[in-house]
Structures are given as structure tokens and as C-alpha cells.
């Protein structure tokens, strides 16, 4: 099976899910991305990507029991699936390979 | 700090996302909203971002659409009757709208059937033609942005096989076919020098004329044809699909300008006839370039002369599409608006019908919907499913509708007045891709329209449905739909009955003279070819011959006859007064006797008299009353003739009864008769015979008599006065037939709707009816229970329909020929007819209700 390539935003979302572990639902995922990637994320774009990742079987989601502080609405939690982990690893390896030996203008060897 | 996010945004989001996902998304947003401490704008932006993503085509917004589609097909297969009814209702409405659209298309949008028609435009003025022939010749070769051909439409008589027919022709420049890039069926178009003076007169005849008058005979090319006293050589036959550049007015012949200069078009105008232009844009030129160039040319026309009428009427450049005939477009406007309205009503009725059917279905399936909803289907999902079902029905309706539209188009074409001797009217009712596209768009729009009520129904809270209850409100909704249908179709029915009444009224108008067993042939003795004495002798001779024909009792001659020709003349009551224009009739003395026009005072013309002597005049009652009020008209002088030089003094010898002279609708107008013995003998004359039995049996012998008048005498139509009058009424008859068939269609649709509502209410109330019968209700009681429901809806519909009609009939006023739009007979007949139809529609379900077996009904679930 050919490796499934991840888009940039997909990668960011997957990483956020990994970082958050058991607490990965909409609000913290957005907060994590905004904090670390420094870019605003609209709820529409986020859920669209999460749905797509789930359809690709990279993540799995489930609904938790409703909580009162959300007006009695349930949370949808996300968890990385093995295939998602593999996709992340492949992406990271690909980038590493591409960066190897690359020196941009004005940069010194670190 | 606001506790709650904007409710509307939240609700929108929930509706859009649907299901448990909606919970998660709104929950997330609410949490963030509270954390960040409010911000309605922020919330709205988030909600809209969700909407944008959901609606974006890249997202699979429609999971399971295929499933919905299968589900719809399965539902339809399970209830073929319901689906079939819905599709037929839609197909009928689609059909009439297809026809309407192809009509509008040919009126406004259809391009000329020539290569690259979008480059073609016409240069016209509203009031006067663009320029003279000479002016056209002067600027033709200097044009840069377009190539222009000049054309001028006219009508003339052409002799074909010894019979003269009235044809429409176009005088065109020799480059006409070149500019339009026209081909031919046979032969060729004009050569470049064929519009220069001295070239042999050449004619190209239309495919239509070739096939109808010349039986598609290829040997026609090269033959000579007499057109207005001049012999023309036929050089080619036009292409089959081209009926001229002024559709729908067809052109029968094209001739070049050189030939007409010498004959009848010149009228002393040294610059030649006035022409319009049809142009084709040069490559890379735009309409703006063409318009600018036309403006410059136009300014040059009027530069030297401020009194030129063209100065106040600027030249227009219009793309050639639809009716190029500006006044025709204006004339059709009321027809178009009333037809659009009626077709729209039919479509609306059909949509209401289908909505009603879907509502009934939805009611039956409420349990199913409720179960699906409780198992997690979102409202949006159920909504969508109903919509998909509607779409599937609409697709069936569209497919059937295109077939129906084609068929209706054929029927209307066959109903169109057959104008055989006049220009071919090229209205087209074809189905092309634009029509198909229009019907598909219409189908989708109607699907949404009629799916909305049941879909909204499906979106509602369905928990009571799980318990098997049907609400009263919903049956009320269906009743209101049905009522609206009754009201709309009653309006059409009233319009139809008004038109029928107007038609009957017109047909019953007595023209004032005998029409049965009479036959006439219309003849023309051109003043250019005949001396008055020669023509008078010729007509006397023809009259003698006609009298000799077996089966002809008597024959006469008149210059005016209703439905054919009316001669106009000038007269005044005294020598010093300005002559007034009025209509007259130059008749053979026995005319009054043969046509049974009564002489109410004085006497008719005597058999004696010579040309040039002071004429005797018979006036009609209106002339006697208005010209000499309160006096005895007999013996009064009448000055005849328009110019002072040609005035002659006549004496009134009799008063004839008023009859109809020009059309059946005319108000009585002054009119006078002269004896043919005393008046000039050239011009139009009708040779009228009174026959035994069917007058058309004598048409051949009468035609033979007319032909014996020699080649100079032109022969026009041969008809009975009855047919001439019927022809006069063709427009009204067509309108009535059209409105009648659309009205009938609307009633059929409304009856289906009403029947559906009553039948459904019976099926819903089976238990109740059984209970009533078990408690002692007779079948008569039950019958009335059900009939009463149907009648109640109808009565409401009739009441609304009457109100609606009172407003709508104003549109019809111009077609009613004086009949009041509030004609009580038409209104009451239509209402009673609807009540009777409604009784019939409710009768069958009512009968079924009386056959309910109480035991079965009580067990009925």
C-alpha cells in the first residue's frame, strides 16, 4: 500500500491530538494549535479536517457523556490510531530526508 | 458577561451540522465562548466558518446521497400509483411550460438560422426606415466594423399557375446572402451585379413557397414568374430552415432592388425606396464599434436638414434574436403575459398537488420518520431525504414533461390559424437544448417548492407520531392546499368561459346580410392595365358568364365585402365642406336583392345608367341619421371625390339597412353605395354567386369564369362569406382554445388534488366511520359526512376563486370584444361547473366510506 501523505494542516492536527493524549477534544485541540503553531483555527476547518482524518482511519472519535458546563452537550474525543501514528512517522522521516544537508542562505552550520 | 452564545447562530449551526456532531461542535464553541468571556461576533464568525466548510464542494457534505436516492426509488417502486400520479401531474405542467418557453424563445431569444448568428444585428428606427436606397449605396463600401445588406419587406401578388396569390417578399441588396452566409436548396443567390440597373429581374423563392406552391419541382429554377406585372427569372430556392430575417413573418420571395425601380416601389422618389439594414460584424469588431459607425452615418443623413423626420428617431443597433419585428413584439406582449401567468398557475397547481401527495405520504410514513429520527437521523438528513424523493419525482416529471411539451407544441401548431395565402408564420415549438435546460431548471425549482412543506414536516418533532397520532393541523394544511387549487383553477375556468362567451357572442353577431349559399371570388383589375370602360365591360361579361353556370341562381358584383376588401372614398354633404373619408361599396344593381340587404326608404339602383353621369347614391341608416339629422335624406345632394378637381355631385335615392362592413365588432359607421353602372370600373371587385347546395361545389366553374378574364385580371381568394367571417374570428378562437385547454388541464390537476384529500381523509377516519356506523349512523349520514368535507373545501375555493377572478379578468378585457369582464353568466356557469366536478371527485371516496364494515374498521390500525 502506498504511504498516505499528510497535508500540512492534517499533520498539525494529528500532532495536536498526539500531544493532548486523553484530553483531545475540540477546544483543547484548537488551543494547542493556536498556541504552538501560532495561527488561528476556525472550528469549521478543524472539524472538517478531523472528519477527513477519521475517514482515512488515521484517528478514531467517540462521544463522551454530556457535561453541564457545556450546556449539556457531549464532547467528541479523538485518539490516534496505529495508521495515524505510521503516517506521522512517515511524514517526519520524509521531511528529515528532505532537510538533510540543506543550508539556507544566511544560516550557519549549527 | 453574557452567559449564552447567540441563540440564532447556535441554532443555525445545529441545524446545519445535524446529529451528535452538532452537539460536539456547539458544545466546543460554547466552552470556548465562556472561557474567552463572550463575543457574539466571534461566535458568529465561527458558526459561519462551519457553514462555509460544510457547504464547500470539497467536503463530502452529502454522505449517503446515493443511499437516499436508492431509498427514494424503493419508496416509489413500493407505491407506483402515488409516484405515477405525481409524475403525470408534473409532466402536464412541465409540458405546458415547455411549450410556453419555446414560444418565448422564438419571440425573444432565437437567433437566425445562419452561420455564426451572434454576429448578426439589425439597424432600424422605430418610426421610419433607416435610409434611402441611394444613401445605403453611398456608404455601403466604406463600412469598416461590419458588412451591411439592405432589405425592405413588402407584400405583392404573384401569379402562379394562373392563380394570383398574395405573397410577402423582400427587396434585398445583392450581397444579402453573402452577408448572412446563406446557402440554397437549389440554384444560386444573386450575383454581385444583380442589383445594378439594367440586369435581368431575378427572384429567389423560399423553400416553403417552393414546396407548397411548386410541389418541390426542381424545374422551377430558370422559369419565369410574373410578379407585379414584371417577369422575373427564378434563379434559386432558399435554404429549408430560413424563412427570412423577420421571423415569425416568413418571406416567400427575395428580389433585388434594380427591378423594382422601374415598377411600383419608386413612387417618384429619386433616392429609391427606404430600407433597413441587417449587418454582420467584421472579425474583431464589437457591437459598440458598429453602433458608433451607425451613429456617424446617421448624423450625416440629417446634417443638412433639420426637418428630416429621422432627426427625431435615432438609429438603433439590435442583436438579431427573436422577433426582429418591433411592433410584432409589442403586439405579442399581452398574449405573452397572459400565457405566462396561466402556465405559471398550472405549474403552481401541479406543485401544490404533488406537495399534497407527498404530505399524505409523509403522514403515512410519520412513524417511519419518527423511528429514524429517534435512531439518530438528523432533521437535516430527513429533510434531505424528502428533497431527494421530490427530485426523483421531478426527474420523472421532467422526462415525461419534455415528451408532453413536444406533443403540446405539435397540437398548438396544428391549431394555429392556417394562413395559407399569406406569409408563412414561422412560430417554432421545437425542443432544443435550451428548452430542455429550462425544463430541468423548472423541474428542480418545483421539486424544491413541493418538497418544502413535507420536508419541513419531516424536520419537526415527531415524538407524537411514535404513538400513532395524526394532528388536526396537518389535515388542515392539506385542505388549504386543495382550496388554493380550486381557487386557481376556477380562475382559469372563469377566464375560459368568458372567452367562450365572447366567441359565441361574436359568432352570433349578424353581419346584416345573407351569407349561406354564397360564394365569391376576389378579382383585381389594375388601373395601370385597364381603362375604366374596358374593366367595366369585362366585369359585365364575367357576370353574364357566372349567371349561365349550372347551379348558380344569381350573380352580382361588389367592391366591398366583409372579410375581403373594403373600398374607401371621400364625400361631403355640400360643395364647400371639406370631404370626409368613409367607406363605400360600388355594386351591381341587384346586390341588395342577392345579399338581402334591406332598403328601408326610397329605392335601390335601377338597371340603367352610364359611366360619368351624375350618380345615384344609396346611404346606410347611420349616414342618413348623422349627415341629415331629423331630415329626409332622399333627394339630398352628396359631393363625391377627394380632390376638388374630381368632385361629382350625387343624389341620395335610398336608405339601406346598416350592416357590418369591415369587421363584426365595428360600431355603425356612415357608408354609401354607388351603382357600378355609374362609377369607375377598375380596382378590386368581388364576383359573388348565389348557389344551390354547398357553394364550394361551384368553386371550379367560378374560377374558370374568372380565368376567362384574361392574363391581366388578377385572381385572389375564392371563399364563402361564412369562411371569411370565421377567418376573422381566428385570433379569438385560438385564444379560447388555448385558454380552454390550459383551464381544463388545471381542473384535472385540481380534481386529482381534491380527490386525494377527500380519499385520504376517509382512510384516516376509517375507524371513526366504523364507530359511527356501529353506533347507528346510516350510510346516508356517512355519505354526507365525506361529501360535506369535499364541498366545504370547494365552497371556500370557489369563494376565493371568485375574488381572484375579479382581479384577474382585467387582463382579458382586450380579448372580450365588448363583453363585460364581470359577465354574470360566465362567472356563475364556471362556479357551478366546479361545484359539480367537486361533487363527482368526492363521490367515489364517499361511496367507499359507506361500505366500511364496522367490525373491520374497529380493528383498523
Image (cartoon, coloured by chain):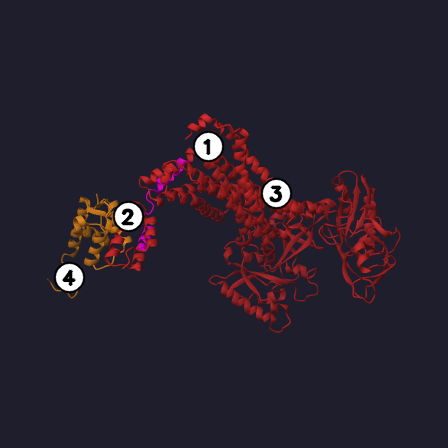
Q: Which residues are magenta?
A: B47-75
Q: Are marks 3 and 4 in contact (CB under 8 Å)?
A: no
Q: CA distance from mark 4 to mark 2?
A: 48 Å
Same chain for marks 3 and 1? yes
- Which element type, helix, strand or loop, lies under badge 3? helix
Percent of width and height locating residue B278: 56, 60
Q: Nearer the viewer, residue B758 or B676?
A: B758
Residue picked out by circle 1: B768
- Looking at the rendered image, the disc whose residue lies closer to the viewer, 3 or 1, is 1
Q: Which dot marks residue B830? A: 3
Same chain for marks 2 and 3? yes
- Disc 2 or 3, which lies upstream in sequence? 2
Residue picked out by circle 4: A103
Percent of width and height locating residue A52: 26, 48
Q: Residue at x 46, y 36 (%)?
A: B82
Specify few, some or many for label 2: CA neighbours under 10 Å numbering under 14, 14-19, or 20 or more.
many
Chain ID, red in image: B
Q: Nearer the viewer, residue B443 or B281?
A: B443
Q: Nearer the viewer, residue B201 or B665?
A: B665
Same chain for marks 3 and 4? no
Q: Are marks 1 and 2 in contact (CB under 8 Å)?
A: no
Q: Which dot marks residue B556? A: none
Examine the rendering and report whether any part of residue B212 can be seen: no
Q: Are marks 2 and 3 in contact (CB under 8 Å)?
A: no
Amino acid at each position: 500500500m502506498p504511504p498516505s501523505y499528510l497535508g500540512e494542516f492534517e499533520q498539525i492536527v494529528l500532532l495536536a491530538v498526539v500531544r493532548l493524549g486523553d484530553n483531545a477534544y475540540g477546544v483543547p485541540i484548537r488551543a494547542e494549535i493556536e498556541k504552538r503553531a501560532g495561527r488561528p483555527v476556525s472550528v469549521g476547518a478543524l472539524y472538517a479536517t478531523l472528519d477527513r482524518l477519521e475517514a482515512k482511519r488515521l484517528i478514531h472519535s467517540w462521544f463522551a457523556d454530556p457535561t453541564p458546563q457545556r450546556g449539556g452537550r457531549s464532547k467528541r474525543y479523538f485518539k490516534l490510531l496505529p495508521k495515524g501514528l505510521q503516517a506521522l512517522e512517515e511524514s517526519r522521516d520524509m521531511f528529515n530526508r528532505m532537510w538533510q544537508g540543506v543550508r539556507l542562505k544566511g544560516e550557519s552550520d549549527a | 458577561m453574557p452567559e449564552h452564545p447567540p441563540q440564532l447562530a447556535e441554532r443555525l449551526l445545529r441545524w446545519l451540522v445535524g446529529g451528535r456532531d452538532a452537539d460536539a461542535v456547539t458544545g466546543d464553541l460554547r466552552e470556548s465562548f465562556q472561557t474567552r468571556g463572550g463575543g457574539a461576533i466571534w461566535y458568529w464568525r465561527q458558526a459561519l466558518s462551519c457553514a462555509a466548510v460544510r457547504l464547500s464542494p470539497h467536503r463530502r457534505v452529502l454522505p449517503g446521497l446515493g443511499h437516499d436516492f436508492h431509498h427514494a426509488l424503493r419508496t416509489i417502486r413500493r407505491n407506483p400509483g402515488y409516484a405515477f400520479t405525481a409524475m403525470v401531474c408534473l409532466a402536464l405542467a412541465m409540458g405546458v411550460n415547455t411549450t410556453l418557453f419555446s414560444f418565448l424563445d422564438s419571440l425573444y431569444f432565437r437567433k437566425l438560422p445562419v452561420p455564426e448568428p451572434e454576429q448578426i444585428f439589425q439597424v432600424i428606427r422605430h418610426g421610419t426606415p433607416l435610409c434611402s436606397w441611394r444613401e445605403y449605396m453611398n456608404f455601403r463600401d466604406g463600412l469598416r466594423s461590419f458588412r451591411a445588406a439592405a432589405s425592405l419587406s413588402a407584400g405583392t401578388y404573384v401569379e402562379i399557375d394562373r392563380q394570383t396569390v398574395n405573397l410577402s417578399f423582400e427587396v434585398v441588396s445583392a450581397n444579402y446572402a453573402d452577408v448572412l452566409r446563406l446557402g440554397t436548396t437549389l440554384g444560386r443567390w444573386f450575383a454581385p451585379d444583380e442589383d445594378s440597373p439594367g440586369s435581368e429581374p431575378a427572384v429567389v423563392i423560399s423553400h416553403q413557397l417552393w414546396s407548397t406552391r411548386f410541389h418541390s419541382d426542381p424545374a422551377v429554377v430558370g422559369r419565369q414568374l410574373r410578379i407585379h406585372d414584371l417577369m422575373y427569372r427564378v434563379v434559386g430556392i432558399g435554404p429549408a430552415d430560413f424563412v427570412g430575417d423577420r421571423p415569425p413573418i416568413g418571406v416567400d420571395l427575395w428580389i433585388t432592388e434594380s427591378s423594382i425601380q422601374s415598377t411600383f416601389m419608386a413612387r417618384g422618389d429619386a433616392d429609391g425606396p427606404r430600407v433597413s439594414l441587417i449587418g454582420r460584424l467584421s472579425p474583431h469588431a464589437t457591437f459598440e464599434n458598429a453602433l458608433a459607425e451607425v451613429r456617424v452615418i446617421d448624423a450625416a443623413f440629417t446634417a443638412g436638414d433639420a426637418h428630416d423626420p429621422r432627426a427625431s428617431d435615432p438609429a438603433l443597433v439590435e442583436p438579431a434574436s427573436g422577433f426582429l419585428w418591433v411592433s410584432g413584439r409589442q403586439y405579442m406582449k399581452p398574449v405573452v403575459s397572459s400565457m405566462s401567468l396561466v402556465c405559471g398557475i398550472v405549474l403552481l397547481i401541479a406543485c401544490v398537488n404533488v406537495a399534497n401527495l407527498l404530505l399524505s405520504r409523509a403522514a403515512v410514513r410519520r412513524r417511519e420518520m419518527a423511528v429514524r429520527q429517534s435512531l439518530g437521523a438528523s432533521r437535516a438528513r430527513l429533510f434531505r431525504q424528502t428533497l431527494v424523493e421530490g427530485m426523483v419525482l421531478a426527474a420523472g416529471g421532467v422526462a415525461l414533461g419534455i415528451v408532453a411539451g413536444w406533443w403540446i407544441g405539435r397540437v398548438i401548431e396544428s391549431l394555429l390559424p392556417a394562413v395559407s395565402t399569406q406569409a408563412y408564420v414561422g412560430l417554432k415549438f421545437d425542443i432544443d437544448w435550451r428548452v430542455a435546460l429550462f425544463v430541468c431548471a423548472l423541474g428542480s425549482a418545483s421539486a424544491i417548492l413541493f418538497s418544502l412543506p413535507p420536508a419541513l414536516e419531516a424536520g419537526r418533532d415527531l415524538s407524537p407520531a411514535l404513538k400513532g397520532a395524526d394532528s388536526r393541523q396537518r389535515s388542515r394544511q392539506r385542505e388549504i392546499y386543495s382550496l388554493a387549487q380550486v381557487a386557481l383553477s376556477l380562475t382559469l375556468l372563469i377566464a375560459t368561459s368568458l372567452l367562450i362567451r365572447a366567441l359565441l357572442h361574436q359568432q352570433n353577431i349578424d353581419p346584416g346580410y345573407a351569407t349561406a349559399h354564397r360564394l365569391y371570388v376576389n378579382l383585381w383589375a389594375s388601373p395601370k392595365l385597364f381603362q375604366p370602360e374596358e374593366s367595366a365591360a369585362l366585369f359585365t361579361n364575367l357576370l353574364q358568364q357566372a349567371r349561365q353556370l349550372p347551379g348558380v341562381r344569381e350573380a352580382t358584383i361588389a367592391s366591398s365585402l366583409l372579410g375581403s376588401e373594403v373600398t374607401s372614398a371621400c364625400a361631403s354633404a355640400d360643395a364647400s365642406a371639406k370631404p370626409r373619408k368613409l367607406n363605400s361599396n360600388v355594386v351591381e344593381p341587384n346586390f341588395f336583392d342577392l345579399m338581402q340587404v334591406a332598403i328601408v326608404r326610397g329605392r335601390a339602383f335601377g338597371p340603367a345608367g352610364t359611366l360619368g353621369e351624375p350618380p345615384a347614391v344609396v346611404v346606410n341608416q347611420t349616414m342618413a341619421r348623422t349627415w341629415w339629422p331629423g331630415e329626409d335624406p332622399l333627394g339630398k345632394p352628396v359631393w363625391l371625390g377627394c380632390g376638388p378637381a374630381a368632385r361629382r355631385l350625387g343624389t341620395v335615392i335610398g336608405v339601406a339597412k346598416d350592416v357590418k362592413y369591415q369587421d363584426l365588432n365595428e360600431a355603425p359607421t356612415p357608408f354609401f353605395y354607388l351603382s357600378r353602372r355609374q362609377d369607375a370600373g377598375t380596382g378590386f371587385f368581388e364576383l359573388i354567386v348565389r348557389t344551390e347546395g354547398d357553394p364550394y361545389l361551384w368553386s371550379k366553374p367560378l374560377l374558370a369564369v374568372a380565368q376567362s378574364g384574361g392574363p391581366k385580371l388578377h385572381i385572389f381568394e375564392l371563399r364563402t362569406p361564412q369562411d371569411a367571417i370565421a377567418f376573422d374570428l381566428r385570433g379569438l378562437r385560438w385564444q379560447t382554445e388555448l385558454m380552454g385547454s390550459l383551464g381544463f388541464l388545471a381542473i384535472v390537476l385540481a380534481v386529482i388534488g381534491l380527490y386525494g384529500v377527500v380519499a385520504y381523509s376517509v382512510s384516516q377516519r376509517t375507524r371513526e366511520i366504523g364507530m359511527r356506523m356501529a353506533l347507528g349512523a346510516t350510510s346516508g349520514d356517512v355519505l354526507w359526512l365525506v361529501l360535506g368535507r369535499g364541498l366545504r373545501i370547494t365552497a371556500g375555493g370557489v369563494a376565493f376563486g371568485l375574488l381572484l377572478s375579479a382581479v384577474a379578468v382585467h387582463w382579458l378585457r382586450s380579448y372580450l370584444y365588448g363583453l363585460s369582464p364581470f359577465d354574470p353568466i360566465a362567472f356563475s356557469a364556471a362556479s357551478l361547473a366546479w361545484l359539480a366536478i367537486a361533487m363527482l371527485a368526492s363521490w367515489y371516496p364517499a361511496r367507499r366510506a359507506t361500505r366500511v364494515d364496522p367490525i373491520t374498521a374497529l380493528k383498523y390500525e
